[in-house]
Amino acid sequence: MSPVIVTCEDRVLLSLGAAGSELIPGAIVQGIVNTIDRGLSIAEALRHPRVNLTEEQPRVHADAGAEVIAMLRARWPSLQVSARGHENNLGIVHAVGRDADGHPEGAADDAWDGSSVSVPSSSAL
C-alpha cells in the first residue's frame, strides 16, 4: 500500500515497505522517524515499540514502557496493549538502506517471518 523511498539530495537513504492494511502508513512513518530522526540502525528502528492511534482501536506494543502506556491510556482509555507477534503486529515493515558508514543494511520486521542478509560493500549490486 505504501512503498516508500526516502531521499536526500538525490541520494537514496532508505526504502521501506509494509504489510498490515490500515496499520501500514503509521508503521512506515515510525520506521522513518526511528531511522532518520532518531538515528537508529534499520534493525533497531524496526524492533522499536510501535503505536497505532485510532479513535476506534488505539494500540501500543507492551515494550513501549509503563510511562508511555499510562500517558496514552489517559487520552485513549480503550488503549489495547499487546506483545509483538504475528497476531498482534502493528504493521510489518521491511527496509533497506545504508548505515552511518555508507554500507548497505537491511532488516525484516521480527513480528513476522522474514530475514535480511548484509553483504560486504564490494559485493553489493
Image: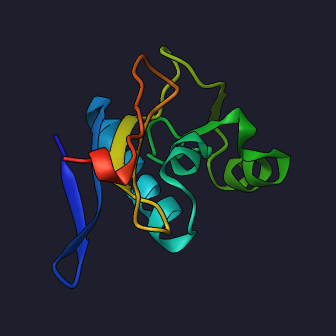
Which residue appears at 31% of the width and 52% of the height?
A: 122
Determine the residue located farthest toward the front in the rendered image: 122
In this view of the protein, can residue 25 be seen by the observer? no
Residue 91 rendering spot, x and y as whole percentages: 40, 35
Q: Is residue 6 above or below residue 55?
A: below
Quadrant for the N terminus in the image: top left
Determine the residue located farthest toward the right in the rendered image: 66
Q: Is 89 situated left or right of 25 in this image?
A: right
Q: Nearer the viewer, residue 87 or 79?
A: 87
Which residue appears at 53% of the width and 21% of the height?
A: 88
Residue 28 rendering spot, x and y as whole percentages: 35, 50
Q: Is 22 situated left or right of 69 in this image?
A: left
Q: Is 61 situated left or right of 112 in this image?
A: right
Q: Nearer the viewer, residue 22 or 28?
A: 28
Which residue appears at 35% of the width and 45% of the height?
A: 95
In this view of the protein, can residue 106 be seen by the observer? yes
Q: Quadrant of residue 41?
A: bottom right
Residue 5 rendering spot, x and y as whole percentages: 21, 59
Q: State the colouring used for the structure image.
A: rainbow
Q: Nearer the viewer, residue 32 or 24?
A: 32
Which residue appears at 63% of the width and 36% of the height?
A: 61
